[in-house]
Image (tube, grey):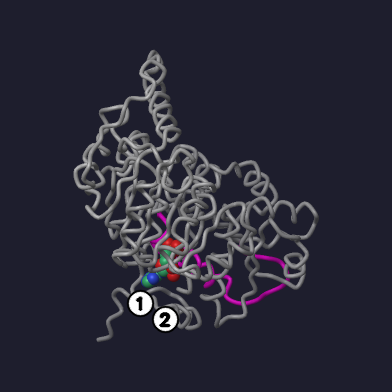
């Protein structure tokens, strides 16, 4: 009369793994786990289309750990590749957690630091290697990794790996490791290039798709504010924090500069200094890892990150994802909002967009096959005036977008100079103008001034 229908007990996993699963707090297998675990245990090649947040890591790790079982010999038997060091570290950590009641040895290999410790770990004997393709190939070519015992190879976030130009390294790896092996490939999206890779890499794979391509996680509530400029984005953010509407939050920005600006604007006046961190490529690797750990542990409430720095971050229970600006790589929208609403938690994604970003959000809405609901800017939020330079930059961007769509379009920017913005007095009414996409710029108020940095500012 035991209920074994939908628990981890239904899989042929050993007690050590089941105990680790229980310790991790997993009770019900997620859909990708339901499908992947039995197939992988049976030895099939698997093509999994699944976003982060679906439980895909445990979906491939559990059956693999079951096969590797215990420490044996010196040479690795399983290779797991991921595109970034953050993701490599995170997967390796998951291996550690799920294999904690076994003696399986695992190591994370990634660049950005000297290879000495990594080489020592390999030499001591290792069962599972989690690596970026580049660092693996480096160490292999130095003769540090014996590959003859490799039985399983996994490519995680294959789409990202291809976007980041890892294909040549993956090809070289496939040339040197034993042909007879089991292969698993996971990807959040399934564009043509990943399909091609899957033909090269997988043998008669079973395809598993847990949600249609690039659809957004159903547990994420999405909304959007159309705003005239960056300062107003900051004002709304400050408002959302002050009213307690958002708590554990990741704020995504397009660039390092914007990340730093948002950080400077929020730190202190809005969010206590110790509660907010910023990570991007200019920050040292250790700083990034420390910040992520602090955020994961709940010691830091707000993390500001660029898309590149955020790749592969696994952080649970994020209440909100803020798209401070709209990502230009449209799939990143899906990746960004996948950070919230993980594993059955309800999350919320809030996007800010200027008129110059309308173009991109339309494309994103096409990809996710839904319209993101728009909300009015709350009355208490000050609508800041748009600085002249920001206005010009937006108009130029809009011109370029139009040219892209219509190569015969000559450009309105130089003809019209910059159209005068429509002046609205009340915050509540101003935003309806700001959200309009039909005019060049209907954005800010008369006084061109950027409250913080602009020298011409009146404030
Ligand atoms: P992933 O998609 O692999 O990045 O996993 C997303 C998050 O869900 C991770 O933090 C996992 O620890 C967690 N998770 C994975 N499987 C389950 C499960 N069956 N139940 C609850 N949480 C899970």
The magenta segment: 50-78
In the displayed structure, 426 sits above or below 109; it is above
When asked about the image quadrant of residue 408, the answer is top left
Tell me if 51 is positioned left or right of 445 in this view. right
Tell me if 353 is positioned left or right of 328 in this view. left
State how far apart marks 1 and 2 are (Cα).
7 Å
Secondary structure state at the residue bearing disc 1: loop
When asked about the image quadrant of residue 438, the answer is top left
Please indicate, yes or no, whether residue 88 appears anywhere in the rendered image.
Answer: yes
Q: How many residues crowd mark 2 within 10 Å: few (<14), some (14–19), many (20+)?
A: few
Which residue is at a point 42% across and 65% down the rendered structure image?
Answer: 271
Q: How many residues crowd mark 1 within 10 Å: few (<14), some (14–19), many (20+)?
A: some
Q: Name the residue under label 2.
A: 22
Q: Of label 1 and label 2, which has the lower sequence position?
A: 2
The CB of the residue at mark 2 lies under 8 Å from ligand 1: no
Numbered mark located on residue 27 in the image: 1
The question of residue 65 being in magenta is answered with yes
The question of residue 360 being in magenta is answered with no
Q: Nearer the viewer, residue 252 or 159?
A: 252
State the residue lying farthest toward the bottom: 1
State the residue lying farthest toward the right: 142
In the displayed structure, 144 sits above or below 300; it is above
In the displayed structure, 162 sits above or below 401; it is below
Q: Nearer the viewer, residue 81 or 46?
A: 81
Q: In which quarter of the image is ligand 1?
A: bottom left
Do the numbered discs 1 and 2 sit on residues whose CB atoms are within 8 Å? yes
Image location of residue 273, percent across then percent down: 49, 67
The CB of the residue at mark 1 lies under 8 Å from ligand 1: yes
Which residue is at a point 38% across and 15% down the rendered structure image?
Answer: 415
Which residue is at a point 63% across and 58% down the rendered structure image?
Answer: 131
């Amino acid at each position: 009369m035991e209920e074994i229908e939908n628990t981890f007990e239904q899989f042929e996993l050993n007690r050590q793994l089941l105990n680790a699963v229980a310790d991790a707090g997993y009770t019900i297998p997620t859909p990708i786990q339901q499908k992947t675990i039995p197939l992988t245990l049976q030895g099939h090649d698997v093509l999994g289309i699944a976003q982060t947040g679906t439980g895909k890591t445990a979906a491939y790790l559990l059956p693999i750990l079951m096969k590797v079982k215990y420490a044996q010999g010196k040479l690795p038997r399983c290779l797991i590749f991921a595109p970034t060091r953050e993701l490599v570290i995170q997967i390796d950590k998951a291996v550690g957690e799920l294999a904690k009641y076994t003696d399986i040895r695992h190591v994370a290999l990634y660049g950005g630091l000297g290879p000495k410790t990594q080489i020592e770990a390999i030499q001591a004997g290792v069962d599972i290697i989690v690596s970026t393709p580049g660092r693996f190939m480096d160490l292999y070519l130095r003769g540090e990794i014996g590959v003859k015992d490799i039985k399983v190879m996994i490519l995680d976030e294959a789409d990202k790996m291809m976007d980041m130009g890892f294909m040549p390294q993956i090809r070289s790896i496939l040339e040197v490791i034993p042909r007879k092996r089991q292969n698993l490939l996971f990807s959040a999206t399934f564009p043509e290039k990943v399909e091609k890779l899957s033909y090269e890499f997988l043998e008669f794979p079973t395809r598993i798709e847990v949600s249609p391509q690039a659809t957004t996680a159903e547990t994420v509530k999405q909304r959007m504010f159309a705003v005239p400029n960056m300062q107003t984005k900051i004002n709304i953010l400050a408002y959302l924090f002050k009213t307690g509407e958002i708590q554990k939050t990741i704020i995504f920005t397009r660039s390092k500069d914007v990340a730093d600006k948002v950080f400077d604007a929020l730190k202190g006046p809005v969010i206590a200094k110790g509660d907010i961190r910023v990570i991007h490529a200019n920050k040292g690797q250790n700083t990034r890892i420390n910040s992520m750990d602090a955020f994961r542990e709940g010691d830091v409430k707000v993390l500001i990150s660029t898309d590149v720095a955020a790749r592969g971050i696994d952080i649970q229970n994020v209440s909100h994802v803020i798209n401070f600006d709209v990502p230009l790589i449209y799939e990143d929208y899906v990746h960004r909002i996948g950070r919230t609403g993980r594993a059955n938690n309800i999350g919320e994604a809030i996007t800010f967009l200027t008129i110059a970003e309308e173009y991109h959000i339309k494309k994103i809405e096409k990809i996710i096959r839904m319209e993101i609901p728009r909300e009015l800017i709350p009355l208490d939020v000050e609508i800041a005036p748009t600085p002249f330079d920001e206005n010009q930059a937006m108009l130029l961007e809009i011109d370029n977008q139009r040219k892209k769509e219509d190569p015969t379009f000559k450009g309105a920017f130089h003809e019209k100079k910059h159209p005068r913005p429509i002046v609205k007095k009340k915050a509540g009414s101003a935003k309806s103008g700001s959200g309009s996409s039909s005019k060049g710029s209907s954005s800010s108020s008369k006084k061109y001034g950027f409250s913080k940095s602009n020298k011409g500012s009146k404030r």
